[in-house]
Amino acid sequence: MMPTPRLLLEEKQTASNRTPRHINRNLIFNQIRTRQPISRADLARTSGLQRSTVSLIVEELLKERWVVEGTVGSIPRGRRPTFLGVNRRRTVLAVDVHPSQITLAVADLSGQISAESQLVLPSDPRKVIRTIIDGICKTIAAHPGLSFVGIGMNLPGRFSHRLKKTIFAPNVEWPIGQIKSRVESATGLPVEVDNVANACALSEVWFGYSDEARDIVVVNVSEGIGTGIFANGRLLRGAGDGAGEFGHVQVEPKGLPCGCGSCGCWETVASNRAAIRYYQEITGTRAPSFDAILQLADAGDPAALEAISRMCKALGRGMHMIVSALAPSEIVVVGELTHLWPLAFPIISAELRRFPLIGIPRLRMASEPDTARLRSAVALVMNDKSL
Ligand SMILES: [Zn+2]
């Protein structure tokens, strides 16, 4: 028997937590964001929605000040259309948190970044959260003309939405657990936090680079490795919000100790830190940073190229495990490694395909990779606004 439309609708709601109304609002807002300035008539054309539906949603978005009416367009004849654009005075404070530094950015709702600064965190763990809060407050104070919708923070760890605190962050030595509540009480603004890979997965879908009907896995390669899984129309969080820790699956039983307490985890062989170690093993000298290795590799330095190659092979091997487990249609890589994507891609891809798989996903780097992490913090806040 065919299910009734009502059942279908309910199924859709459970699958993605989003009603058709939300999906249409998101669609219209994304059209305005990516095609602004745009008229209502063009919105109807590009979205494929009825003109009346478009008008209704636009009125709602105008009333809620997500979008604004701007210049009047000129067409050869007929009524001159008023163009729509996102409200640039409504902004998100994006905070990209790494274990030892943070990046703060002011971004509009379209993910355009207007100010960006970095802050090195103090070595005294007791002073870190205070330093982050000071940085946030200074950034807000420096932009008195803007209205901040909220603060989006992505974290190098897992955040439990039930416990409202960070529950797993093996590479962080300061008390990251209470960061959401402390920033909220210091600023009075809503603070959305999540694991950086989760945030990036959400962002690929929210900003429309990945179709939400597709299953994607974001692999964030940084000091460690985290993955964000978007499947069946929503983030897969698992019990206690702990899903996605492929970085801590043991791939070498006799491998090096990992911050999580195990040894030979995937991130010990495939992260930026692993590449730094490979470089040291090859040359006997320590590279100052992962960026330095990237620059050397870009200039053709054989030791740096070898270090990057070992890292990429280890990445490919781990991705084989991810594809075997989840069969996503896309794997999206986020991280500094994307600066050398033309070099990294063939090595990762070859390793991923070395042994049989039922299906090979599309492997790509994040769209606009340099700002992917910051834009993901915007997506965290905006996703919560049901746009
Ligand atoms: Zn580990």
Image (spheres, rainbow, N blue to C red):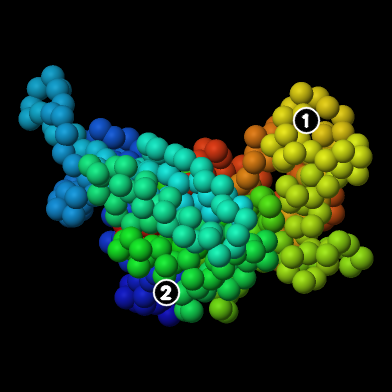
Circle 2 is placed at which residue position?
A: 14
Residue 358 x, y percent position in the rendering: 74, 58
Query: Label 2: how many residues lie within 10 Å, few (<14), some (14-19) or many (20+)?
Result: few
Judge left or right: residue 53 versus residue 16.
left
The secondary element bearing badge 1 is classed as helix
Residue 228 x, y percent position in the rendering: 58, 60
Q: Residue furthest top?
A: 76
> Closer to the N terminus: mark 1 or mark 2?
2
Q: Tell me the number on the disc at residue 310.
A: none
Residue at 41% x, 70% y: name it: 181
The answer to whether residue 48 shows anywhere in this view is no
Q: Nearer the viewer, residue 274 or 142?
A: 142
Residue 344 x, y percent position in the rendering: 74, 38
Query: If the image is split into quadrants, where does the C terminus sit?
Result: bottom left
The answer to whether residue 89 shows anywhere in this view is yes
Q: Nearer the viewer, residue 29 or 166?
A: 166
Residue type beneath disc 1: Ala
Residue at 56% x, 68% y: name it: 175
Image quadrant assignment for residue 25: bottom left
* Mark 2 lies within 8 Å of ligand 1 (Cβ measured): no
Q: Tell me the number on the disc at residue 297.
A: 1
| Number of marks in the rendered image | 2
Residue at 14% x, 23% y: name it: 74
Please tell me whether mark 1 or mark 2 is closer to you in this view: 1
Residue at 22% x, 42% y: name it: 145
Q: Nearer the viewer, residue 296 or 344?
A: 296
The secondary element bearing badge 2 is classed as helix
* Mark 1 lies within 8 Å of ligand 1 (Cβ measured): no
Query: Label 1: how many residues lie within 10 Å, few (<14), some (14-19) or many (20+)?
Result: many
Residue type beneath disc 2: Thr
Q: Nearer the viewer, residue 144 or 234?
A: 144
Is 261 drawn above or below residue 210 in the view shown? Answer: below
